[in-house]
Image: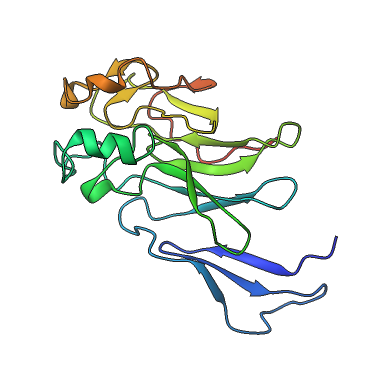
């Protein structure tokens, strides 16, 4: 292996520094490869590479507990939004959040991998399958034992529920009746954990 870059995930950007074996400090200024990442509230960022090094994954957490300020409908109407955005994509103050994105190593060709992940933390890649995984701290104020936190593989095109549903087809009462089009479409996470236990990392 001959790594050429060190990548750093900032709250609002991904940068990389040129690297040569043996370097103990940066030899030059950082190169910004992804910018304009929403930076408030869940402001920590996780990045991980696919085993072949060709895909850079980025997790961006939500900007709130349960999208209280997002608004009931996106500008231009829900029908137009659904047709032009990934399944379960949020809008307004939550646009571009609660999702996992993927890029080329130089930051180009960005796309959304999955949505509805309130705060995908400790992201890593399962070495046998190459799939990204993370642990998710779910929403508050539904009760001491609801909803479960979870660990899950991040499946291409999947929607994991936030903010309208949780752990499959359980509708959040604070968003009751807002997205009947998403009923039955939220993926169920792989491993459930005690509610409010706040898992922070995952390793294989």
Residue 117, image quadrant? top left
Residue occupying image coordinates x 47% and y 64%: 10
- Coordinates of residue 94 in the picture (x, y in percent): 27, 47
Residue 65, image quadrant? top left
Residue occupying image coordinates x 74% and y 77%: 24
- How many numbered discs, if any? 0
- Coordinates of residue 69 in the picture (x, y in percent): 16, 44
Quarter of the figure with the C terminus: top right
Quarter of the figure with the N terminus: bottom right
Q: Residue furthest right?
A: 1
Q: Is residue 29 left or right of residue 175?
A: right
Asked if one can make out residue 161 in the rendered structure from this viewpoint, the answer is: yes
Nearest the viewer among 165 and 137 is 165
Nearest the viewer among 107 and 128 is 107
- Coordinates of residue 201 in the picture (x, y in percent): 56, 40
Q: How is the image coloured?
A: rainbow
Q: Is residue 71 above or below residue 26?
A: above
Q: Residue furthest bottom?
A: 28
Residue occupying image coordinates x 38% and y 64%: 36
Residue occupying image coordinates x 70% and y 37%: 130
- Coordinates of residue 125 in the picture (x, y in percent): 66, 40
Q: Is residue 158 above or below residue 24?
A: above
Asked if one can make out residue 143 in the rendered structure from this viewpoint, the answer is: no
Nearest the viewer among 173 and 97 is 97
Residue 44, image quadrant? bottom left
């Amino acid at each position: 292996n001959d790594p050429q870059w060190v990548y750093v995930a900032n709250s609002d950007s991904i940068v990389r520094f040129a690297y040569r074996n043996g370097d103990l400090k940066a030899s030059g200024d950082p190169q910004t490869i992804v910018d304009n990442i929403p930076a408030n509230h869940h402001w920590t960022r996780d990045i991980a590479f696919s085993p072949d090094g060709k895909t850079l994954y980025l997790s961006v957490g939500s900007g709130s507990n349960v999208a209280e300020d997002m608004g009931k409908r996106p500008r231009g109407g829900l029908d137009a939004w659904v047709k032009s955005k990934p399944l379960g994509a949020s809008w307004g103050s939550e646009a571009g959040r609660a999702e996992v994105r993927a890029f080329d190593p130089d930051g180009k060709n960005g796309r959304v991998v999955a949505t509805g992940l309130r705060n995908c933390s400790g992201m890593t890649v399962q070495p046998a399958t190459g799939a990204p995984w993370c642990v998710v701290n779910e929403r508050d104020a539904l009760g001491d034992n609801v909803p479960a936190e979870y660990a899950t593989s991040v499946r291409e095109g999947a929607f994991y529920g936030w903010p309208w549903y949780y752990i499959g087809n359980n509708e959040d009462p604070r968003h009751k009746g807002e997205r009947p089009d998403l009923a039955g479409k939220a993926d169920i996470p792989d491993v459930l954990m005690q509610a409010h236990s706040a898992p922070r990392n995952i390793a294989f």
